[in-house]
Image (cartoon, rainbow, N blue to C red):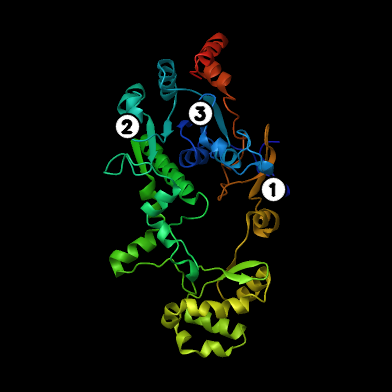
Amino acid sequence: MHGGFKNGCEMRIKERSLEGVKVIEYASLVAGPYCTKLLADLGAQVIKIERPEIGDEARRRGPFPNDIPHPERSGLFLYVNTNKLGITLAPETSAGKEIFLALVEWADVLVEDRPPGVMAELGLSYDVLKLANPRLIMTSITPFGQTGPYRDYKAHSLTISHGAGAGFLTPVDASEEELGPVKGGGLFDRYSNGLSAAAATLVALYAREMTGEGQHIDVSEQESSIAYDRVEISMFPTEGFISRRVRPFGGTVPLPCQDGHALIAIGEERHWKALVELMGNPEWTKDERFKDEESRFKHAMELHPFMSQWTGAFFKEDLYRKLASAGIPAGVVRSQGELIERDEQLKARGFFVDIEHPEAGRLAYPSASYWLSETPWRVERPAPTLGQHNDEVYCGLLGYSGDDVVKLKEARVI
């Protein structure tokens, strides 16, 4: 079953928001594919181009079911490529370039993540492509953008995280303050950059409806990541303040519980008074170091052991309910498994959906963070296997014969 909603959540089948929008994806791993996934999930027809025989690098990244690597069972690839058609193509060959141009003529949007200058070397720069399709929107995602002294630099998540200053903000305990560079958890920066690219692409599509003209979108992952830390970044020019990696009490340092960790955010003095009362007015709360917000901020690491001793007596869900009932901002650190299996809010909204894949089987996927009443999100198809839709695209869309496809495959063009 494709797109089955768990817990009986059903939706009427309607036209979707981007029905009729045609997208070519020439990208790998996360940012570019996540950008086009967001478009595909809203109804755009997305054709994903992968390297013949090798495919997207994401196919070799985990997690894998049962920890057994397989190019068709990567959880990363499966998630960021739902609702897409998948073909193989080598645009660096003369025949491949011809096919690429034919696809561009068909498309409304091209999303690519090649290093600056590579598309031009292939004879596929925006100036060339817009001759074939003046209405084309080309979204180029690179680590540092198409211009500037860093334009040709390569980057991994750690590089982007620190190039944006985000790594310096990653919270750590006091004992870890002198540790080397760290980055945000997982691939958060790459997903956020894909979201920025998708938003820019939608704006360009809207502008094209009014002007009839396409445009080239230059997405810098460094700048996209900075935008998500805009509050912290703006504190320096306005206040001369630099956030420390060690989070003060009231920030985001997790506090230990019997079965995990919880978070307590003391944003106002009334929260602190309510917490002191909830803890039974222990003697240590009268210490001069903790008398007011400024003192607690200054002595945050001295406060942390006292708080940890108190929270350590509770199970995290019980502590959360106690804090919430007292009007104290709090949260629980949950694992992925706990979110899928135990989070009642997510269950009630049917956030996780089961999708059947021909190789990976039935797995639970995150759906969307929004509900559109008239043009709902839904899954039409799982992520494609490598080259799964070659015949559909080359023969059905572009008019090649079966013999042509065989010859193109033998020449390693597709």
SS class of the residue under badge 1? Answer: loop
| Front one among 269 and 289 | 289
- Give residue 76's position: percent from left, percent from top: 57, 42
Disc 3 residue type? Answer: Glu
Mark 2 lies on a secondary structure that is loop
Residue shown at 40%/52% (left/top)? Answer: 225
**Up/down of 120 relative to 28, above or below:** above
Mark 2, Cα crowd under 10 Å, few <14 / some 14-19 / many 20+, is: some
User: Could you say where residue 194 lies in the image, as x and y percent from the top left?
Assistant: 46, 44
Q: State which quarter of the image contains the N terminus.
A: top right
Give the Cα distance between marks 3 and 1: 34 Å
Residue 138 position (above or below residue 221)? above
Label 1: how many Cα within 10 Å (few below 14, some 14–19, many 20+): few
User: Which image quarter: residue 276?
Assistant: bottom right
Name the spot of residue 389 as percent of width and height, x first: 58, 24
- Badge 3 density bin: few <14, some 14–19, many ≥20, Cα 10 Å: many
| Lower sequence index among marks 1 and 2 | 1
**Type of amino acid at the residue the image marks with label 1:** Cys
**Pointer 2 residue:** 117
On the image, numbered disc 1 is attached to which residue? 9
| Drawn side of residue 320 relative to residue 162, left or right | right
Q: Nearer the viewer, residue 323 or 202?
A: 323
Q: Which mark lies nearer to you, 1 or 2?
A: 2
Task: Mark 3 vs mark 1: give the one in front.
Answer: 3
Amino acid under label 2? Gly
Determine which residue is flagged by label 3: 50
Q: Kindly tell me whether residue 312 is visible in this rendering.
A: yes
- Residue lying furthest left in this view? 149
Q: Is residue 259 above or below residue 76?
A: below
